[in-house]
Image: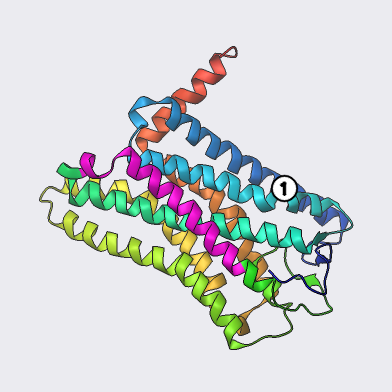
Amino acid sequence: MNWQNRSVWMEFAFLAYPSRTELRILSFLGISLAYAFIITGNVIIVTSIQTEARLHTPMYYFLGSLSGVEICYTAVVVPHMLANTLQSEKTITLLGCAVQMVFFIGLGSADCFLLAAMAYDRYVAICHPLRYPLIMTLPLCVRLVVASVLIGLFLALQLVAFIFSLPFCQARGIQHFFCDVPPVLHLVCAKSHIHEQSVLVAATLAIAVPFFLIATSYVFIVDAVLQVRSAAGRRRAFSTCSSHLTVVLLQYGCCAFMYLRPSSSYRPEQDQLISLVYTLGTPVLNPLIYTLRNGEMKEVIGKVVTRNCLSPNS
């Protein structure tokens, strides 16, 4: 990264936070409640999967990994958002902004790749049920999770290194709540089609490629399910995929809107609203979707919560 003629302590200022005291307090309370629910919900899912032996299967291993990634993903930006909501000085250094963007984009991309791995798991389970235990082994699951995180962080590092090697304008006010690609790229003075295409390439690799793999998996899944003769069998097969498919549509809908578009369509207020959806809204909904639509998860979580509440010494 080229830091020549500038200091890593150069600061950006966030301009999207409310200035009125009442709105700042309401924003702090709203974000705090959402963050508490995200952490609590995902920690309960991870704990339930780890402590219940019957959930030690590839599907739940991926779900637990997804919850772990989402805990880290929100921790990158939400505590900083909470601090900025109450502070009069809402600034971040150039280096701090770059680091925040690497982990936010990297873990968000890892989320997308993990959803693709979960789709592959469902494909094998439904289309090749007899070979499922032989294909979806624990070592393969671990490799898929590790690869998802490493590829996500690698793509994010390349993109952020490119963005922060560009010259920034004198105005350093970010029309956003945190360091995301579109608002930071909007501060770059030397704009060209190369810059825009570089972002689109990175977004395509992190978003469009996993989505294509998910879509391909579901084409084979739907074809296999439609060949099942019993209606009960079809319902059972679709029910194992419905939660995953709901999360995919939420995640990829927001990400595609933010990153797979030309920079000319950048609208600060609109982007701020969408960013709150995939930073707070989707992580809040994911634990609900995976528990309320999964009878086995509801039963296990009920047992874990009850056991912990009734056994204070455990």
Q: Is residue 300 above or below residue 190?
A: above
Q: Judge by depth and name the residue closer to the eye, 192 or 289.
A: 192
The question of residue 46 being in magenta is answered with: no
Indicate the position of residue 75 as horizontal and vertical percent values. 65, 47
Residue 164 visible somewhere in the drawing = yes
Pick the quarter of the image with the C terminus. top right
Q: Is residue 144 above or below residue 96?
A: above
**Circle 1 is placed at which residue position?**
79
- Give the side of residue 243 with respect to residue 216, left or right: right
Q: Judge by depth and name the residue closer to the eye, 148 or 5.
A: 5
Indicate the position of residue 90 as horizontal and vertical percent values. 83, 59
Residue 293 visible somewhere in the drawing = no
Pick the quarter of the image with the N terminus. bottom right
Indicate the position of residue 144 as horizontal and vertical percent values. 39, 49
Mark count: 1
Q: Judge by depth and name the residue closer to the eye, 99 or 67.
A: 99
The residue shown at (21%, 49%) is 126
The residue shown at (72%, 66%) is 176
- Give the side of residue 29 with respect to residue 243, left or right: right
**Magenta span of residues:** 132-159
